[in-house]
Image: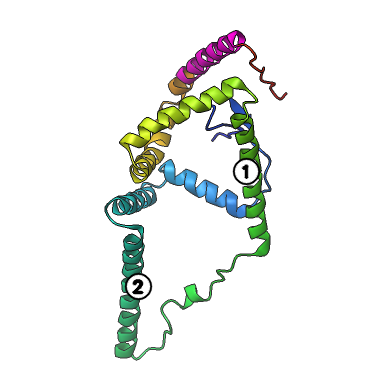
Amino acid sequence: MYRISLFKCPFFPFEPCPVPQLPQCCCLNSAGWLVKDLVHWRDPKKSGVVFGLSLLTLLSLAAFSVISVVSYLLLALLCVTISFRIYKAVVQAVQKSDDGHPFKALMEKDVSVPPETFRKHVDASLTHINRLLKQLRKLFLVEDLIDSLKLAVVMWLLTYVGAVFNGITILILADILLFAVPPFYEKNKTQIDHYMEIARTQVNTTMAKLQEKLPGAIKRTKAE
């Protein structure tokens, strides 16, 4: 088991950035471990169900409108719950039993969101939003010429991606990669890390040489 203390910025794939310290929340931690277990296929049955349902939903959105997909999903859920409710009522009538409502245990569960949990989520989101706004200000006001050029290249490449794929197609590909890449990385971690380090070194060296040759380029100050 490994811990990730650095993440890569979306605009600068070869420059690690420190992760901001966020308030700890048991809900966030448990949800994070659940997602990690799913994408790493710790339980193949659960991962297969989640992957199949997510892919089916995205494919449905590609063929139908969002309203139609949501309506059909809710209608299917209602059909299941109503059918089960009627079935249990008939069984109780035939057996002359008094088991009560079949969903009583679920109905008695507290589904309200605690104010503390809500505030923690808001604080965590606010930290990311503020950091993103500061980063965007640096990029679009050209605080560092190299970084702004990187963003320009990425946006230029995305214009070609947008001409070939629409948003739903990209989400479908992302869903497939989300469940395919982690197990592949775990099996070939050593080789992938080796080649990624070579690529990172080459790109950083090239960028450093380019920055030295550009007139008026601002040197990036790295946090210690």
Q: Which residue is mark 2?
A: 78
- Report the disc number at residue 19: none
Instruction: Please say if 172 is above or below 109.
Output: above
Say whether residue 46 is left or right of residue 119.
left
- Give me the residue at 31% from left, 73% from top: 79
- Give me the residue at 33% from left, 60% from top: 69
Quadrant in the picture for the C terminus: top right
Q: Position of residue 27 (x, y in %)?
A: 59, 55
Q: Amino acid at mark 1?
A: His
The question of residue 57 being in magenta is answered with: no
SS of the residue under disc 2: helix
Residue situated in front as seen by the camera: 206 or 89: 206
- Give me the residue at 48% from left, 43% from top: 36
Instruction: Please say if 125 is above or below 83.
Output: above
Quadrant in the picture for the N terminus: top right
Q: Position of residue 127 (x, y in %)?
A: 66, 45
Residue situated in front as seen by the camera: 72 or 193: 72
* Circle 2 crowding by C-alpha within 10 Å: few under 14, some 14–19, many from 20: few
Say whether residue 51 is left or right of residue 198.
left
Residue extending furthest toward the right: 224
| Residues rendered magenta in the picture | 195-214
SS of the residue under disc 1: helix
Say if residue 13 shows up in the picture.
no
Q: Which residue is mark 1?
A: 128
State the predominant SS element of the stretch in magenta: helix
Q: Amino acid at mark 2?
A: Leu
